[in-house]
Amino acid sequence: DRKRFEVGKLEYKQKRVLCSEPITVQDGHLFMCDYLLSLAYFALVRVCVEWHQPGAAMLLDLDVSLSRLKDAKSIDELFGDSVVPAEELSAPAGTRFRTLLRHLAVGQPGLACGNGKTLKSYNMSQLLISHLYDKELARATKEMEALREDGVEEDDGEAPAQQVNEDEALRYIFKQKLEGERTAKTSTDEEGWFTETDRNVLALLDQRRDGGGRIWGQMILMRVYENQENMTMQTVLRDALGKLGLVQTDGGSDGDSAPRAFSVLSDITDTKIAEAIEPYFLEQFDLNRALGSDEIWGFDRNGEVCCKTDSPSRTLQQIFGRKLASYQRES
């Protein structure tokens, strides 16, 4: 019974007494673990280490990523020139990616998550490792063993195929994902290794920062029905960006104002974008001014966001209001 399976703890005060409440697994937590696995793959294999620099593309050329994978003696070796922080590298040989997933799955954020409650801790290890990652490895192992058995049958007298280890299975998965990404824009393979979640993460990361540091990319919308589930997902995914090196703090910026790969925003009933979005985006894109005023905002001839004084267009706040009303009608 998955309702008995706990993925975290909530704390709240009731009559001045500090109480604790377990968070039971919901569909959104399963989706989130799928995103954690995909983000870990992209951070290790696809993201450029200079992604945060003005004018830089977020992703390496696909052929460069394939070459890195081919040249690496092991998956562990990929960590050396990836964005994943150095402190994540200390793990027994052959287990660094598994160790990274365990690091993503556990945290103690102590973050308010609505209704007077605080997300004290989360632990998605069983979902992320046992339910998802180990099953992916088993599937890859099965496919590789089948390929090796076919090769043995073709070469009479050869020794039995060797057992597939975790590093080999992981390399196979990464290679299949890279090949799947190459054809993702023109074809869909429901059984392929490049999943729908990978497509969504690719859409978020397939971006470029212009000379002023502004990001040009896409947005992904995920419908979640329960507020605590929603806020848990926001917290875990925001934490994951920092753990994966997708929050750049080397330049002296603190965690709140440091450049981030993208925003993760939980939109519940009482969400105020100007208060809930990460401070970096408020500061970098002047969202406080855009959200808090009646000025008209739009794009100039160069595609830059600007205040427009002679346009009949709606304000940014009005646009959000109309979008929300439309979304509620469709729901």
Image (cartoon, helix red, strand yellow):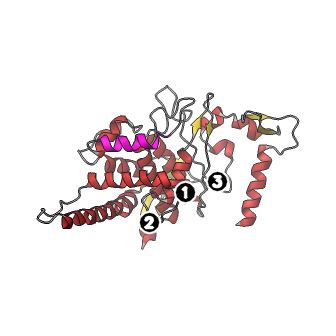
- Name the amino acid type tagged 3: Asp
**Residue 9 visible in the current orientation:** no
Q: Residue 267 carries which label?
A: 3
- Name the amino acid type tagged 2: Glu
Q: Which of 103 and 4 is in front in this view?
A: 103
Residue 152, above or below 322: below
Real-space CA distance between mark 2 and mark 3, rounded to the nearest whole angstrom: 32 Å
Quadrant containing the N terminus in the rendered view: bottom left
The residue where tag 1 is placed is 186
Instruction: Nearest to the eye among marks 3 and 1: give it.
Output: 1
Is residue 64 located in the magenta-colored stretch of the structure? yes
Query: Which residues fall within the magenta stretch?
Result: 59-72
Q: In which quarter of the image is residue 231?
A: bottom right
Q: Seen in the image, is 165 located left or right of residue 178?
A: left
Q: Residue at x 30, y 41 (%)?
A: 72
Q: Nearer the viewer, residue 114 or 175?
A: 175
Q: Main secondary structure of the magenta part?
A: helix
Real-space CA distance between mark 2 and mark 1, rounded to the nearest whole angstrom: 16 Å
Q: Where is residue 197 in the image (x, y as percent from the top left)?
A: 50, 57
Secondary structure found at label 3: loop
Q: Where is residue 245 in the image (x, y as percent from the top left)?
A: 44, 38
The residue where tag 2 is placed is 191
Badge 3: few (under 14), some or many (20 or more) residues near its Cα, within 10 Å?
some
